[in-house]
Amino acid sequence: MNPEKVLDAIDLKIIEILQKDARTPVKDIAKEVFLSSPAVSTRIEKLEKAGIIVGYHAQINYLAFGYHIKAFINLEVEPKQKGEFYPYIQAQKNVVACNCVTGDYSMVIEVAFQTTVELDHFINELQQKFGRTKTLIVFSTSVEHRDVPL
């Protein structure tokens, strides 16, 4: 499904508003798109049911909770290991994201840890269970996660 062919300008504006602040009251969105609150609620429900809006979340400052170590781990996983790997990686609480990629490594795992000792332990576990790794520790982030323009 190509959302641009299904969504009209009002749907796109509603999504844009919710991307900026998912807590924007429906009545405020309604004022911006010149519709009634019930009409906006119906559109949001439709967008959720269609899988275009897939969730709402609070963005947390990990540093406030002591997670000072952010890293990207490249991991080589054999195709036959993926059945074991996917449930394992989903269960790891320090994994922020995991992407299957092309190139020398098959997975790129974003993690957050409070200490380098914890990160080292996790990397050793990955190597013992699945294979070769290459780790990049983040010094700073110039662009935080953001949504792409619609």
Image (cartoon, rainbow, N blue to C red):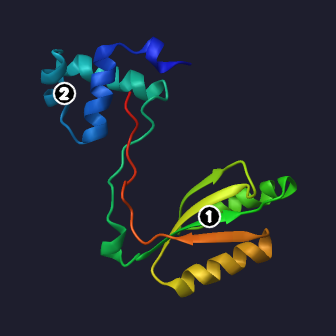
Quadrant position of the C terminus in the picture = top left
Residue 52 got which mark? none
Give the residue displayed 42% in from the left and 32% down from the top.
53
What residue type is disc 1 on? Ala
Please give the label number shown on residue 91: 1
User: Residue at the location (33% across, 61% down)?
Assistant: 60
Secondary structure, mark 1, is helix
Q: Tell me if mark 2 has few (under 14), some (14-19) or many (20+) residues whose alpha carbon lies within 10 angstroms of its own.
A: many
Residue 43 in which image quadrant: top left
Q: Residue furthest bottom?
A: 117
Cβ atoms at labels 2 and 1 below 8 Å apart: no
Q: Is residue 15 above or below residue 39?
A: below
Q: Nearer the viewer, residue 83 or 110?
A: 110
- In the figure, 71 relative to 77: above or below? below
Q: Which residue is mark 2?
A: 29
Q: Amino acid at mark 2?
A: Ile
Horizontal side of residue 86 vs 68, given as left or right? right
Task: Classify mark 2: helix, strand or loop.
Answer: helix
The answer to whether 26 appears left or right of 110 in the picture is: left
Marked residue nearer the N-terminal end (2 or 1):
2
Q: How many marks?
A: 2
Quadrant (top left, top right, bottom left, bottom right) of the N terminus: top right
Where does the image place residue 45, in percent across and percent down from the top left? 37, 25
